[in-house]
Image (cartoon, rainbow, N blue to C red):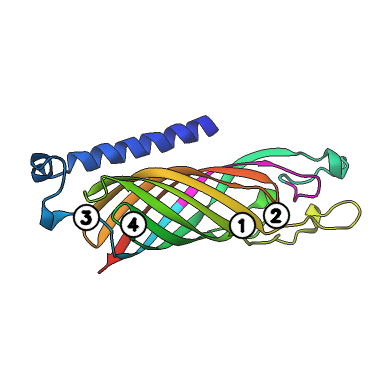
């Protein structure tokens, strides 16, 4: 299933890239690949707000005191419960507030809010915040490719089911987690103030348990001035 997700991410990114390239105006091609002066689409000195939807597949490797990643089996001891799990990650809203320092680099604050909790780990809907940057190629053109490294923290706690407690009566520790994120994908600006994007990437946490989400995101961005 992970292979299928990666293939789907790459297929979508390739398709969007092809569509955007097909839409490029001929004046850009006639001027050595650059937009005419009055049609350049760099994000320098613009504030941006983006909103997208993220979905993916999550892989978890538990520590002994991590929350369970499957409904606990009452016939097994705590240390014998499943340690390695994989499941579809709940969809989440992905938001970012950015400022273009230069055309090619756009630092941002981001937040991600789950649209539902995760039943397999008895976790409330995702709440994560962080900082990152988008680094663009062909930064003054309508069509761009970006890479986005970011870090963040995951804040949500357990959903409270007693079935996810340990046999000694204690509860799993839903630690505030530290996240690493890396994504890559196309961005297409229809105007100086509006564009769309998609990216494939991964987000990894290491404190609550070792977990990685292979994900795909699509959304829109508005900018001023």
Q: Which residues are magenta?
A: 54-68
Whole-angstrom CA distance, mark 2 to mark 4, is 31 Å
Q: Which residue is mark 3?
A: 41
Query: Which numbered disc covers residue 220?
Result: 4
User: Tag 4: Cα neighbours inside 10 Å, few (<14), some, or many (≥20)?
Assistant: some
Residue mark closest to the camera, 4 vs 1: 4
Query: Which numbered disc covers residue 122?
Result: 2
What residue is drawn where x is 63% and y is 39%? 86
Callout 3 secondary element: loop
Residue mark closest to the camera, 2 vs 4: 4
Q: Using residue 50 as the reference point, say whether residue 167 is left or right of it.
A: right
Callout 2 secondary element: loop
Callout 1 secondary element: loop
Q: Are marks 1 and 2 in contact (CB under 8 Å)?
A: yes
Q: Position of residue 140 (x, y in %)?
A: 22, 51
Whole-angstrom CA distance, mark 4 to mark 1, is 25 Å
User: Tag 2: Cα neighbours inside 10 Å, few (<14), some, or many (≥20)?
Assistant: many
Q: Nearer the viewer, residue 125 or 65?
A: 65
Whole-angstrom CA distance, mark 1 to mark 2, is 8 Å
Q: Earlier in the sequence, mark 2 or mark 4?
A: 2
Q: Which residue is mark 1?
A: 117
Q: Quadrant of residue 83?
A: top right
């Amino acid at each position: 299933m992970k292979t299928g997700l990666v293939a789907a991410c790459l297929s979508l990114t390739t398709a969007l890239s092809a569509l955007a390239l097909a839409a490029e105006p001929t004046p850009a091609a006639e001027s050595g690949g650059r937009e005419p002066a009055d049609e350049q689409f760099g994000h320098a000195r613009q504030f941006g707000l983006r909103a997208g939807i993220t979905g993916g597949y999550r892989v978890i490797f538990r520590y002994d005191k991590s929350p369970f990643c499957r409904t606990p089996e009452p016939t097994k001891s705590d240390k014998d419960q499943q340690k390695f799990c994989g499941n579809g990650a709940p969809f989440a809203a992905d938001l970012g507030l950015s400022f273009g320092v230069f055309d090619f680099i756009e630092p941002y604050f981001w937040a991600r809010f789950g649209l539902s909790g995760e039943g397999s780990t008895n976790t409330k809907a995702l709440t994560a915040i962080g900082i990152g940057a988008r680094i663009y190629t062909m930064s003054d053109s309508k069509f761009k490719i970006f890479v986005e490294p970011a870090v963040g923290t995951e804040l949500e706690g357990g959903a409270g089911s007693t079935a996810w407690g340990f046999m000694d009566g204690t509860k799993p520790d839903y630690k505030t987690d530290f996240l690493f994120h890396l994504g890559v994908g196309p961005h297409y600006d229809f105007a100086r103030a509006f564009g769309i994007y998609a990216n494939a990437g991964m987000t990894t946490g290491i404190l609550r348990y070792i977990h990685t989400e292979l994900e795909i995101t699509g959304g829109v961005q508005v900018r001023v001035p």
